[in-house]
Structure formats: structure tokens, C-alpha cells
Image (cartoon, grey):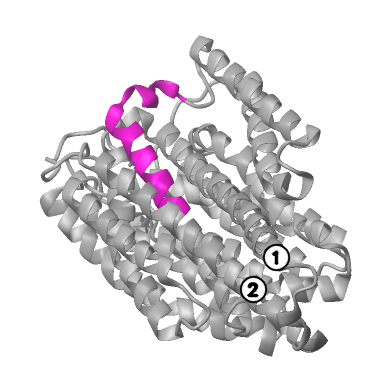
Amino acid sequence: MTAAAQQAPAARRVATVTSDGGLTHWLGPLLVLIVGMFMTVLDTSIINVAVPTIQTEFGGSTADIAWIATAYSLVLGVIVPTTAWLGDRIGLGKLYTWSLVGFAAASALCGVSWSLGSLIAFRVLQAIPGGILPAITMTMLYRIVPKDRLGSAMGLYGIGVIAAPALGPTLGGYLVEFVGWRLIFYINIPVAVVGVLLALWMLPKFAQQPTYRFDVLGFVTVATGMVCLLLAFSEGASWGWTSMPTLGLIIVSVLSLALFVVIELDTEHPLLNLDVFRNWPFVNSLLVMSVLMVGMFATLFYIPTFLQSVLGLPAVQAGLVVMPQALVTAVMAPLSGRLYDRFGPRWLVFGGLLISAYATHLMTGLTINTSTGQIIGWTCLRAVGVGLAMMSVQGSGLAALDHTLTTSGTAINNVVQRVASGLGLAALSALMVGQQAQLLADRFALIPGHDPQLAHLGLLGLYQLAQTTTLEVTVTAFTNMFEITTWLTVVAAILALFLRSGALPSASAPPAMMD
């Protein structure tokens, strides 16, 4: 065998590095990363549709069933801060491949779970690779793509990030209704197998970075802070926002995160390099991204809820109504990437946020007679804005960091996204519940106890009146929530004016791969 033939397998694995630290042929490796990212993001949204069916089979209260999602979120909050250290310690390529294997194995265990307790335990295992994959894929993207093509790469990458949450309810509803809820976990196995094979074939070899002792104190404090914060806002509505457990968790969270900052600033080799917060473009991108995440998940969560609870649509049909916005996003994300490379993020993000704000404002016109066609139009218009803004703002923030801060930056970016979406939904839900209670009390207080005009309605008539009043109050709470989201988006649009304008020039960087 000739030397050239012996080197052929390695040639597939080690690609050419350009002068700016990226790859000459980066599209194939990028598609490999999209597979892993799409699978994990899809899993977080597809499970919600199966919850009622799982409760019917395994039993348990609503609070018990909620731990299927809550446990997963808590573990994500713990594992994501460690991804920067793990990536340097193990190597990004190896960590990505083994995380795919771990996610497939944990998904198989979830599919064979025999009780609610076993399912929750396997979801905890699934969350470990599920938290690693989204964080390290972004770091890998910045290592393999030349800086002057980041926009195009982020646009393609954004298809998985933005479209997967919208496709999840539709796919999950179909599988649950026509096949069985266990398939929502089994479906991850073939996807992960394909991802592993493609990763072994197409991913370049990443240079292993020097690592130091694991920052145990930093990990303990940030893990405690994140778990307490996410748990408080997950359970606050049921426990009561002013109850001792909720307030206690929030206080412990604040103190733990404050201690984490002190430890990290005083540690020579911190778990997360907090120098990223000295970079205003990165911090500004986090602020804008937080609002985008709140608005996106509010739409993805509350529009299906409105369709089912107010318009009375079944889960599958509700999923079909929200699916077109995913198709719009799939078209807009690559287009916005090309525009980002040419014009920079400022006007893309500003325009996208204004479109999103206008579309969200249209949603304040929801009534009990709103047609599904109107809702499809509003959500698709909003998807145009999100598609323009989402990956552009995320890309601009990370591109502003020095290459040595990319791993910490991507980890912090993922933490902020998850916290913002969780806390935002919790706050909006608390607002809606409070408004519904107050509006119902006010409406029924206007009805006299012995009104002769109501006597002729009878029991059935009074029941229908109560149902109609409840629906109207629910719709009012929805519209008020979307009005708040509208103005938050306008504020984010103003912040977007401080983003960079113009194309990002190519700059030299240390090679991301080793020969």
C-alpha cells in the first residue's frame, strides 16, 4: 500500500485550515453539527405533547408529571457551565461524538421506562448530553467556519435552532395520536447513529486545548444557583410566588451566583471566563437574545394553548397551525445569514425585531372568533422577523469575542438563553394567572346575587354564561401578555441599534485544528 493510500482516511478527517482559522470546505462538518443540534432542540419541545398520554399510562398528579420537563431543565442548568472545561479536556470532536452516543442511549432508556419515576430518572441522564451538545456545537462552528462566512453558516445552523421547536408539537402530536408516545424517544436513535457516522467521517480533528484542575468551588456555586433559580421559577406558580420555598430558593440562588462571580474572579483558571462580560457587544447581544427567546417561546407555548383551550382544536390540528412558521424560518435563516455577511447585524436585527413586534401586536387582536388563517398569518410574519434577527444577534456577540473566550462565551450564551426563556415564560404565566383571577372576580362581582334578569336563563343558561365569561377573560389575559411582549421587543430593537454595522473583515486566528 502506498503512502498516499495510507493517508487517505486521515485526509477525510483533517481538513485544510484557512488563514483565518477556519476550514476551506466547512459545509459538510457544519451539517454534521446541525444534526446534533436539531435532535436535542426538537426533543425539548416534542415531549410536551406527550405529557397527558404519559400521565394516563403511568398515573401521578400534574405536579409529578411536570418533573419530566423540570428535571431535564435543572440538569441542563448544571451541565452547560461545564462544557467549556469538558471541551478543552476531552476535545470538541470526541465530546460531540460521545454526547451523541449518550443521548441515543438515554433516549432508548426513556422509551423503555416502566414507571413515572424511571422516566424522570432517564430524563436526567438524557439531559447530560442534551446540555453538552448545543453548547459545544456553537464553539465548533466558530472553529471550522472562516470569519467572513460566519453569517452564512449561522443562517444554516439557525434552521435547526429556530425550526425544531416549532416542528416538535406537530411531530409529537402525530406520533402520540397515531403510533405511541414511546416513539418520541426512539426516533432519536437512528438520527444519533447517522450523526455519529457522519461525525467520524466528516468532522476535522480539533486541537486539544491545555486544561487545568476542575474548578470545583465554581461548579458547586453555579450549579446550586442555577438549580435553585430554575426550580423556583418552575414551581413558583404552584407553590405561590411569595411562599417560603419559592423566596428561599431565589435568595439561595442569588447568593450562590454572587459567590460564583467572586470565586471566578479570584481563580487563576475559572470554570467560566467572566471576562466575556467586559465586552459590550457580547453583553448587548445577550440582552437582545434574552428578549428574542422570551418572545419566541411565548409564541410557541401560548399560541397552541390558545388554539386548544379557547378555540377547542385537538393537539395535532393545533400543531399543524403553528407548523408553517417553521417553514418560513427555514427559508429566512439562510437568507439572513447571507445578508449578515454582507451588511452586518445591526439593521438585520433591528428590522427583524420591528417585524416581530408588529406581528406580536397583531396577536393582541385575538378573540374567541379569531380564525386559524389569521393566526397562521401572524405567526408566519413573526417568524420572518425572528429568522432575520435570531442568528444574526447571536453570531455578532460571539464574533466580538477573542478566540480564547469562545468556549466560555458559547456556554454563557446557552445558559442565558435557557434562563431567559424559562424565567420569561414563568413571569408571563404568573401575570396571566393573576390577571385571569382578577378579571373573573371583577366580572362576576358585577352580577347581583338575585338579578331577576338572569332568572329566566336557568341552570344551563347560567352555566353557558359562566363559560363564555371565562373564555373572554382568558382571551383578555392572552392579549395583555402579547402586548407586554410587543413592548419588550421594541426595547430590544432599540438595543439592536448598538450592534455592529458592516461586514466583519477576515482576521487571522490560531488554527482550530491540528494536523
**Circle 2: residue type:** Thr
Picture quadrant of residue 509? top left
Question: Are there few (<14), some (14-19), or many (20+) residues within 10 Å of tag 2?
Answer: some
Q: Is residue 274 magenta?
A: yes
- Seen at 51% across and 70% down, the residue is 303
The N terminus lies in which quarter of the figure? bottom left
Spot occupied by residue 400 in the image (x, y as percentages of width and height): 26, 34
The residue segment tinted magenta is 273-294
- Seen at 75% across and 73% down, the residue is 52
- Seen at 75% across and 43% down, the residue is 240
Spot occupied by residue 266 in the image (x, y as percentages of width and height): 52, 9
Labelled pair 2, 1 in contact (Cβ < 8 Å): yes
Can residue 457 be seen at all in this image of the molecule? yes
Real-space CA distance between mark 2 and mark 1, rounded to the nearest whole angstrom: 9 Å
- Dot 1 corresponds to which residue? 444
Q: Residue furthest front?
A: 452
> 483 or 502: nearer the eye?
483
Can residue 25 be seen at all in this image of the molecule? no
Question: Are there few (<14), some (14-19), or many (20+) residues within 10 Å of tag 1?
Answer: few
Asked if residue 38 lies left or right of residue 329, the reply is: right
Magenta: main secondary structure equals: helix
- Dot 2 corresponds to which residue? 469
Spot occupied by residue 346 in the image (x, y as percentages of width and height): 19, 46
